[in-house]
Structure formats: C-alpha cells, structure tokens
Image (tube, rainbow, N blue to C red):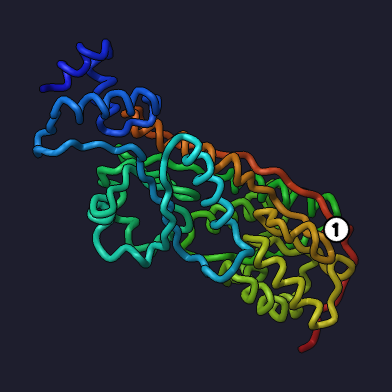
Amino acid sequence: MKIKDIAKELHLSVSTVSKALNGAFDVSKETKQLVIAYAKTHGYKSRDERLTVKTLRRLCFIYDNVNATSQSNIIFPLGLSFSNYARKHNFEVVQTPIKNITTTYNDFMKLNNFDGAFIAGLNYKSKILPELKNTTYPTILYDNVMLGDMIATIHNENINTIARLVEHLKENNHSKIGFIHGDRNSFVSNERFAGYIIGQVMNHMEYKPEYVYYGSFEEESGFEAAAYFAKTDVTAIVCASDLIAIGLIRGFESLGIQVPTDISVTGYDDLEISKYIKPALTTIKQDLDLIGEKAFMLLTSILMNRSSQRVVISGEIMYRDSVAPMHPRKKLEI
C-alpha cells in the first residue's frame, strides 16, 4: 500500500496523508489519528520498512550565558512563553543549556529527533554560532542577527529605545551620562551601547570613554561598577540590563550614594522585580510573551517551507522612580 492508496480510500489529498504520517502541525489531530490507524491496519510501510509516525513534533529551546540558579533574568520566562505557545499546537519543547550539546548542532538536532529550535543568549563566542548559518534545521535566534536559509531572527529595537532613554535623562537635565556594558561579545549589548552613543549625539552631548564601564550581565557586575562611577562626575547611568542596574543601586547604597537623589539609574528588560525594588527602576520593557509567540510563529513558518524573516519588537520605556532631575554632585574620594 502506498500513500496515494490511503488518500484515495480516505478521500484525502496525498499531501494531507503524507503530512499526517510525518506529524505535521497543520493537520488536525483527528485527521492524523484516522490516517495512522488506517495505515497501520492495512500494513503501510515507509521506505525504511517501518511506519514513521510523529504524533508530537519536538522543538528545542537552547540557551547560553545564563546562570541556571538565577531567577532574575529573561531567559527562563522567555523559554516558558515559547513552550506554552508550542504546546498549544501539539509540539513538545525540551529546554537545554548549550553546554549539553557535545556534538555538532545538526547532529544534536538529529540525534534528539528535534524538528527545530529557538536559541537565546548566544554571544559571538558561543560554540554553535558558526554552525548555524548552514544548518538544515529550522532555527530562530533571539537577540542576534544571522543570514541563512533555515535561520530567522527576532530581537528588540535596542538602539532606538536606548537613545530615547538617553533623551529622557537629558530632559531631566542630565548631560554627564555613564553606561555599563553587559558583554563586549554580545550583539544585544553592543546594540544598546550604540543606542547610548547615538542618544548622546542626537542630544548634543559629548561621548567620553571614561564614562563607560565594561562588565557582565550579572548583578555583581553592577555592584562593582558603583565604586568606579563614584569617582566620576556622572549624574546618570544607563545599564545594559536590569540585573546590572539592581546591582549598581545596591553598590551605591553601600557607598552612601542615594538613587535618584544623588545619581539616576536606568535598566533594560523590565524584570518583575524591577517595579518592586527601592527605588522602582526606570527601564525598557521587553514583551517576553509576545516574543515567545512570534518566535514560535517564525519557526512554524520555516517548517512550512516559507522564507526566513527578521522580526524586530519595539520596546516601551517604563518611567519609574530611579530617575530624577539632575543635582550637581562631587566625585567621591575612595
């Protein structure tokens, strides 16, 4: 028995029967069950002499550069959002850190029977990044940009939103504005750094290299940066993430510097904790639910043999209490 025979008997198209036997997501569960039951009953065999049936498609959410013990980051909520949308459409999602991939990316996908992947947290040094351009598996990259037949990307409008944040600080009379870089090898951190520079240019401010601190996306990095900025005359600081900003505020408190009375601080991400810390953090909101949904839609689009795309999500500034009009302050002697 061949696929066309099953199609004729069940009054279905050949393509529908083929998709049902291979677990395509755009065929209803009822149709899949009907086709599979008929095929098994009538002895259908695939080319490798076994009935190949995927009743549940498998996707993988891969993440890198994340402290798995920390709940104060965007990676896990993003993975949850993506997984929720996938499961609604009969996809199984497995979440794994990139360190668990001990083979090539393509071999990892094949060995685990994954149909596609959503990858977050990569930087320029991530080991699988060079392999992705020529991958044969549908792959969505978050906060990275790459060209490839099976690659689509989704990221935030980092540059414009950070530039608007700098403008907001300027409107509060801040002209000496610092920046804490999250990772020199990170696409997203470099975009936010570019937004900081562009925001200064647009607002007729002078860029000063000594106003930039190169750290990491960890809270402790922000804490350590406080001592550095305490010795400068900056009156406001733009942080590449909320975690950095939270650490920075903590560090300033330990030095007797008050936010925002003495210095203003902003973040990026709008973590849940950001509205509850004291002072509540002015930051840029990432709509993680929307990003998870769009990532799933992009992935299914490639699975349906449609061309890959690049999607940019707009950010929203959340105006809170960590920014106040400038008050002149002196460098702290430490």
User: How many labels sit on residues?
Assistant: 1
Assign a secondary structure to mark 1. loop
Looking at the image, is 252 positioned above or below residue 154?
Answer: below
Viewer-nearest residue: 329 or 218: 218
- x and y percent of residue 220 in the render? 63, 76
**Position of 311 compared to 289: left or right?**
left
Instruction: Examine the image and state in which quarter residue 104 appears.
Output: bottom left
Within-10-Å neighbours for mark 1: few <14, some 14–19, many 20+: some
Viewer-nearest residue: 316 or 213: 316
- x and y percent of residue 273 in the render? 73, 61
- x and y percent of residue 300 in the render? 40, 34
According to the image, label 1 marks what residue? Answer: 321
Instruction: Examine the image and state in which quarter residue 243 appears.
Output: bottom right
Instruction: Examine the image and state in which quarter residue 37 appears.
Output: top left
Which part of the image, by quadrant, shows the C terminus? bottom right
**Position of 92 compared to 159: left or right?**
left
- x and y percent of residue 241 in the render? 64, 60
Which part of the image, by quadrant, shows the N terminus? top left
Q: In this orientation, does residue 27 appear?
A: yes
Residue at 30 percent of width and 56 percent of height: 130
Viewer-nearest residue: 178 or 152: 152
Q: In this orientation, does residue 208 appear?
A: no
